[in-house]
Each structure stands twice: as C-alpha cells, then as structure tokens.
Amino acid sequence: MTAARERVISDLRERIASVEGVSARKAGCLSFGVPEIDAVLPGGGVAYGALHEFAAAGRVRWMVQRQHFLRRGSQTDRAAYSRLTRLITLGKSRGGKNNCILHWDDVIAYAEGMIGILVPDLPDDACGIQLRKMAEVFGDHAYVSLCLRRRQNDQLRLHEISNLAARFKVKTVVTNDVLFHEPGRRQLQDIVTCIRTRTTIDEVGFERERHADRYLKPPEEMERLFPRYREALARTVEIVARAKFSLEELTYQYPEEAIVPGKDAQASLEHYIWQCIPDRYPEGLPPDVLPAPDQ
C-alpha cells in the first residue's frame, strides 16, 4: 500500500471516529482470535468504532453479506462477487428501500461460485424444503447456520437442525447471526431498528432484538456456547479459506474508447462533439461557445 493511500485511509477512519463520537479514544482492533482470519484483516481485527471495515488494507478476503432469502451469501472469486452484486441489485429493484425481494429462480441463476448459508428459525418442514433446495443449488458450498435464539428448548432446536442438515447432506456451521461487533452497540442497534420500523424507542416494543447476544465472540466463548458442535465451529475457517475474493481486485479499469476508424482518440472526440452540435444548438453556436469545441 502506498503512503498516500495509507494517509487517505487514516483520514477516513478519523472522520468516522469523529462522527461516532469516539475521537478521544485511540483506534484499536477487535481480534477474532482465529489466526487464519486475523492474518488477513488490517490491524489484525475489526477496528473499534468503525462503521464498516471493508478491505482497508486492500487485501482482505471479506465475505459480503446481505439480508435476503438465504440470509447469507459469500463469494469465492471476482466473477462470483459480480454475480452477487447483480443479485442484490435485482432484489433491491423489486423491494425498494429497506427491502430485498428474491426468488429461488434468481438464486439459481446467479449461484455459481457463491457460498450459501441458510439461517433457519425453526427445524420445521419449511426448513427441510429450504435445505433440500440449498443442496441442489449450492452443492458442496451449501451450509446451514447453528445459532442461539435464547429461547426455550434452544439446544433441542440446534439438535434437530443438525439432524435435518445431515439428512439433506448440508454442512452445519456455527454463527452468531451477528448484527453488531461488541455488546456496547446494542443501543445503536435498537436505534437502527426504530429507524427501520419508523417508530420511537419507547414504542418499538418486540420489534427490538430479544437478546443482546448477536455480536462477535472469541473462539473460546464460541467453544463454550457450542460444545457439541466442534466440526461446525471449525467450518468458519473453512468458509474463510474458500472466499478468496479480495476487494483489491476492484481497481479502476479504463473504459474502452469509442474510436472512429482512421482517427485517434482526440480526433474521435472532436468528431462526436461536432456531430452533436446541431442537436444542441439548432440555430448555430453562440459566440461565447464557439471556441469551446476546439478546446
């Protein structure tokens, strides 16, 4: 990374910290505690106070995530990233602001090279149907999330989801279904919920998250929470290894020029300008504009 780029990124981080009201605190990083993940993150973790930490060092293999029918989507290369962005654009064009509407036919059309993680709520018949479709669409890149809901019979729910996954040959992976990076951001999450539901903090009620557990946790805590699912926990590293796409690959690409046969780029530009002048100025060029085309 060049010194100029480092200065720009440093300035952006300072501005974000100022917006969030944490300018007095030295910037730090929240380490995942997993060497394979921390090694590819700038600073060895996710920056405290950052609104987003996407490839600040230009070499992070980040799994782009969006809330849609599959709940989670990751890409393995640049072509898959391109398909994912087109899929999200399609869903947003249907759903409008704050919504993303996708159908299985859309997912099938764009699924090549992507990793799909289903985040089910209940291990019911609908979950079984979705798992079958996941296996058909994503094959070996299909996963199902095991995450706590902090409700009654949570362990039984995880056990039944795991059994369903084995039945449909979909691999399990432990997640937190994360919404914020550390517990102190629960209040900010509540405010975001109020904005999304167009209500106040006093009236938001059960629209708020039911528990404050949806934040990043170190491996030791995840092992404590999911002692029966060590293989599912290890698959988090497997997914990171598969997601080889880097945002550094999205560097500027000079567009292909519309060159007139027999002319160079400058002459072609002048040709197109004079070609458009009659439409723009049907009565002729005004005196003050006359020198402009030649410039």
Image (cartoon, grey):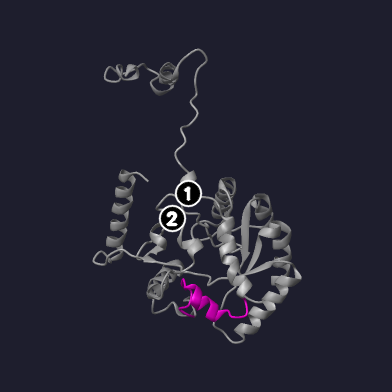
Q: Is residue 266 above or below residue 246?
A: above
Span highlighted in magenta in the image: 211-229
Gap in Å between the C-alphas at discs 2 and 1? 8 Å
**Residues at circles 2 and 1 in contact by the CB criterion of under 8 Å:** yes
Which three-letter amino acid code belongs to the residue tagged 1? Answer: Leu
Q: Is residue 221 magenta?
A: yes
Pointer 1 residue: 247
Q: Is residue 292 magenta?
A: no
Q: Is residue 79 above or below residue 16?
A: above
Pointer 2 residue: 54
Q: Nearer the viewer, residue 63 or 278?
A: 63
Q: Residue furthest left?
A: 24
Q: Residue at x 56, y 64 (%)?
A: 237
Whether residue 216 is visible here, answered yes or no, is yes
Splitting the image into 4 quarters, where does residue 172 fall?
Answer: bottom right
Q: Nearer the viewer, residue 147 or 76?
A: 76
Q: Nearer the viewer, residue 193 or 253?
A: 253
Q: Residue furthest right?
A: 167
Which three-letter amino acid code belongs to the residue tagged 2? Answer: Phe
Splitting the image into 4 quarters, where does residue 230 fall?
Answer: bottom right
At which x and y percent is residue 277? 40, 20
Q: Nearer the viewer, residue 82 or 175?
A: 175
Q: Callout 1: helix, strand or loop?
A: helix
Q: Is residue 105 above or below residue 46?
A: above
At which x and y percent is residue 160? 69, 79
Q: Residue at x 48, y 77 (%)?
A: 213
Q: Callout 2: helix, strand or loop?
A: loop
